[in-house]
Image (spheres, grey):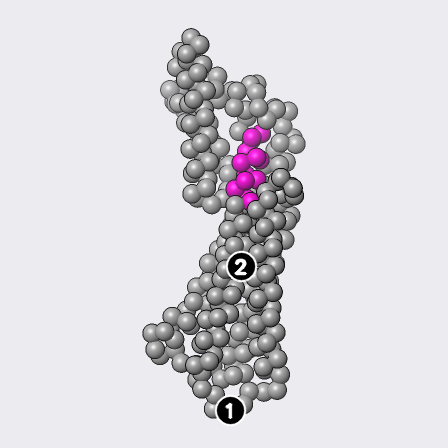
Amino acid sequence: MSTDVDPITAHVDRLGRLLVGPRRAKADMLREVRHGLCDTADALGDEGLSPVEARTRAVAEFGDVRAVAAGYQEELTARRARFTLGFLAVTGPVGEIVYRIMWSNTTLDRMPPEGTFLLARAVDIGGWSLSVVAAALLVLFGMGTRWVPLRAWGVRFVAWGILVKLVVFAVAGAALSLLFGGDVIAVATPSGLVQGLIGPAASMYTLWLVIGCLRSARRLDETTDWVRASPVPAFGGR
């Protein structure tokens, strides 16, 4: 291993490998860490330390990577949860409106079985209710750790709840298509095709966000355990 590796670069790279979260937010966070370390090194250089000594000292004062990772991971996890909830809160009503337009353009050649309209109404109410719940949770998560401390289990609960919603609504949507007569839905027109693709595309993206929440929550648990097990303080040299 080369001995001329910049201590700050090595430190930031190691921190980056430990963190899991939204790519842009993570990149911004690491950039701020790098700038902070460089500013500290510059100040130490003004006190008479050599560039190498100053950068090594700045890294030591920053703290052990595993000890400080928990704070950064908590913020990344909160950002992922907030974005996921915001996406659900916005796309829920949009999806309901799109599907209502799509079904309004459908010509039925037979009456659907008894209870079909009740199922459709239940899906509508459930969709709007979940959007309201997502908006309320978004406000809660938006408070960060000021009022309600962020816990990995809370993010995990939200992620699994959204996953259950995706499964239930996919099954209900398929059932309604069959009950109403899926072969008569007008998707031949460009607008009908777009409307037919919006739902699956939004569901796949939501699933990707859910997986991101679960990965971030797992890493938050791991980094928290590192802090509890580490004899090294979060800040300060060795």
Q: Which mark is residue 166?
A: none
Residue at 54% over, 90% down = 111
For label 2, the SS is helix
Q: Mark 1: give few (<14), some (14-19) or many (20+) Cα within 10 Å.
A: few
Q: Residue furthest bottom?
A: 110
Q: Quadrant of the N terminus?
A: top left
Magenta stretch holds residue 85: no
Image location of residue 160, percent across then percent down: 60, 56
What residue is rendered at 61% in x and 59% in y?
133
**Magenta part of the protein: which range?**
66-78
- Residue 76, compared with residue 93, is above or below; it is above
Vertically, is 41 above or below 130? above
The residue pinned by badge 2 equals 89
Q: Are discs 2 and 1 less than 8 Å apart at CB?
A: no
Label drawn at residue 110: 1
- Considering the whole magenta stretch, tell me its main secondary structure: helix
Question: Identity of the amino acid at label 1?
Answer: Arg
Q: Quadrant of residue 35?
A: top left
